[in-house]
Image (spheres, grey):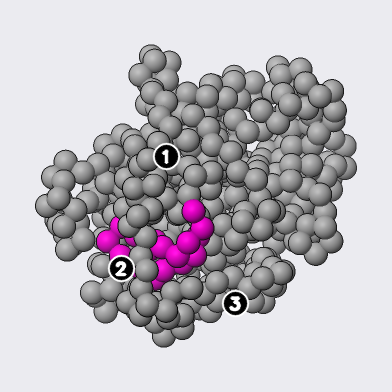
Amino acid sequence: MADQNQFLLEESQVPSRWYNIAADLKNPPPPPLHPGTGQPMGPADLAPLFPMAVIQQEVSAERWIDIPKPVLDIYKTYRATPLIRAHRLERALGTPAHIYYKYEGASPIGSHKINTAVAQAFYNREEGVKRITTETGAGQWGSALSFACRMFDIDLKVYMVRVSYEQKPYRKALMHLYGSEVVPSPTSDTQAGRSVLAADPDSRGSLGIAISEAVEDAATREDTKYSLGSVLNHVLLHQTVIGQEAMLQMEMAGEQPDVIIGCVGGGSNFAGIAFPFMRDRLANGAKTRFLAAEPAACPTLTKGIYAYDFGDTVGLTPLVKMDTLGHSFMPPAIHAGGLRYHGMAPLISQLHREGHIEAVAHLQTAVFEAAVQFARTEGIVPAPESSHAIRSAIDEALDAKAKGEPRVILFNLSGHGFLDLGAYEQYFSGELEDYEYPNELVEEALKMLPHPAGMA
């Protein structure tokens, strides 16, 4: 079976439940804290931002949560996504490793982000919400939520990080196509944006700043809720349809992965592929390795510290315990805009600190080199974010070659790169520069970590 190119599931095999890894953790996740008091937050504290069904999922310890039928009906228009054996890449590398990738670029907007966007839009519609605000980096999340809000007749305002707004005009056009309002962040529309512009009129923006603006917008309007595309528990929960499908498909292939890889910014696509497999490691001590690939320019797992921090720049969000570079972190303008975030999902951070997840940071040109090799062998143009996982998969395959050992590698190809071709042109012309975020700037940003009374 492993000699096949694709492993496809029937519509009836699309998961009908999400998997909640919190149920299988040895240690319960540290609670979110109120930004003012430092005390644990309850559902009522989160109600101004999120619909109650989402809040309940955020704090749930139930192992399985049913997917509502309207959400599942939309899932089944593009799921199950294919699992593909990368035979041509294997031959090009001359490796004994078997390389598989789960292709989430098969969704309507071209990335995995749609899996949680549809769910969040549905729960907002059920609560009577008429308008949502959000942020987006490279635009995959903004595009996904734009699609989902159109499906459920909700207005959406997207605060798009200014550098990506300028680098990726067609992401903006796609959001407009679905009827969303898109503005470059920081803006003069919010107090958060105005304060950033007062300090730096030429600010290129960051996900932290865009989150501050979107949260402020939602918190100051009764008709509006806020939606986030990564980091939080409920977002990672919704993405576990990816890994559940991949488990069935690997069984069809007659193999089990030795290492599972995903790129990480906030952590949603990595959790989506990894968490369902991780259950066997947590419960039974399985030896499967889990590898998170991040940019050297935004090295949250490899250089950050594990501490309570704000999810945004201004300090409007709850405090969560996570691997962080500090909420004042200002990322460089690398093309993997979806990975330019100062913090990591609390669940991934906890598993990383407990030794279940490894992390590696890659330089930008090495990532694009891997992306080009993948495109020229497998035919799919990968997003710059996803290409970090490809870099790690190729490195693993070459390591298996050097050691002369078999190895089964599975990675999540979380989106296509058709709207990122400008970045590839810059790579071919030699305009992309490597940047490794220096330790001294990390140390400076970490001095800004909050320490309110009562914080653990």
Q: Is residue 160 above or below residue 62?
A: above
Q: Residue under circle 1?
A: 439
| Distance in Å between CA atoms under marks 2 and 1 | 27 Å
Residue at the far top in the pictured view: 429
Which residue type carries mark 3?
Ser
Q: Is residue 194 above or below residue 302?
A: below
CA separation in Å, label 2 and label 3: 23 Å
Please provide percent x and percent y for residue 220: 23, 74
Left or right of 15? Residue 218 is left
Q: Residue at x 56, y 57 (%)?
A: 349
Residue at mark 3? 60
Examine the rendering and report whether any part of residue 60 can be seen.
Answer: yes
Instruction: Write down the residue under mark 2.
Output: 316
Q: Which range is magenta?
A: 305-322
Of labels 2 and 3, earlier in sequence is 3
**Residue 131 falls within the magenta-colored stretch:** no
Q: Residues within 10 Å of mark 3 (few under 14, many from 20)?
A: some
